[in-house]
Image: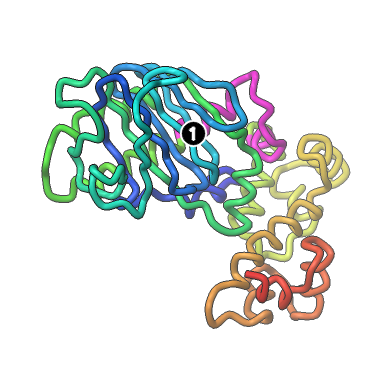
Amino acid sequence: MDAFADLLRGVRANGSVFGHSILSPPWSLRFVDGAPLTLCALLRGEGWIVTEAQPPRRLTVGETVVVRGPRPFLFVDEPGSRAPVLDCGEHCSYPADGGARHRLGWRACGDPGGSTTLIVGAYPVRGDVGGRLLRALPPVLGVSEDGDTAAVSERIAAEVELDRPGQQVVLDRLLDWMLVCTLRAWFDHPDTHAPAWYTALADPIVGEALRLMHDEPARPWTVAQLASRVGVSRAAFARRFTTVVGQPPLAYLTRWRMTIAADLLVEADTTVADVARRVGYADAFNFSAAFKRVKGVSPSVHRSRR
């Protein structure tokens, strides 16, 4: 497991928040469900994504846009569209209510001959692990179609025309695939200021060390052990890791352990001692001290606030 994959483990589509709309102008869809991440992709046609804090962004066929919530945003046929606004949210059940909670094939606006086909997936992103991903993203990001996203788009386009058993599960997984490909393409773009933990994955030494820490965060790693596993001297490894990631190896490991711990602490029937052991601490006292140093509050206060 690498740092990018770890952040996406709990980010999954769910059929209740999948939308497929065939649109004829004018239209104005407002997504109000407050999802932390919403993926929008066009199978055909074009439109505009409008958010409160960003300039309108044109979306054309083959492009995918991810909007970071929770504020509402619009998908319109053109900026300043004269169409009545139709609210779309996960708690709406029928197209007439503007809902995204429905079986495949409903038409939000227009008719089957509409010129624009939009697919939407809303993603819950929870806890401190999910928060680390959200903090790395801008309010709106978009990528043009490449080999990976093109392949997914073709599969989605074929699937939405069918009505077969298990269709929603297939579409959920395809949307998950699309989200991962979109985020990876955005992070890989030369104009993107990707976080250090992501760019470090391409480094043959530091990237391997990160994978080791993410595979076994509870293991009692030392700098010497990590250096030995990646095949360099202790001093060279420590220097290179700090330069590439921006913090020393064990400081990174401690912060990642506390990120995991923050989510474990709010699970039912877990004790501070249980969480301490799961993130590599032999006793709750040392774990609590480390947690407060990193998070600013004790484990018990963190749990009560959540």
Name which residue lies at 50% across and 20% down. 57
Residue 89 visible here: yes
In the foreground, 86 or 244 = 86
| Rendered location of residue 92, percent (x, y) | 31, 51
**Residue on which the image places disc 1:** 66
Quadrant in which the C terminus appears: bottom right
- At label 1, the amino acid type is Val
Above/below status of 92 relative to 183:
below
Does residue 55 belong to the magenta stretch?
no
| Residue 254 or residue 57, whichever sits in front | 57
Name the element at disc 1.
strand
Q: Residue at x 36, y 17 (%)?
A: 46
Q: Residue 294 location, x and y as percent?
A: 80, 61
Quarter of the image where one finds residue 232:
top right
User: Considering depth in this image, is 121 or 110 the residue closer to the camera?
Assistant: 110
**Looking at the picture, does residue 138 appear above or below residue 58?**
below
Residue 262 lies, in percent from the top left, at: 66, 65
**Quick check: 68 left or right of 198?**
left
Give percent across and percent down for residue 168.
Answer: 23, 47
Left-right relation of 172 to 51: left
Q: Mark 1 packing: few (<14 Cα in 10 Å), some, or many (20+)?
A: many
* Residue 46 higher or lower than 137, as above or below: above
Placement of 216 over or under 292, stated as above or below: above
Main SS class of the magenta portion in the image: helix
Q: Which stretch is magenta?
A: 181-201
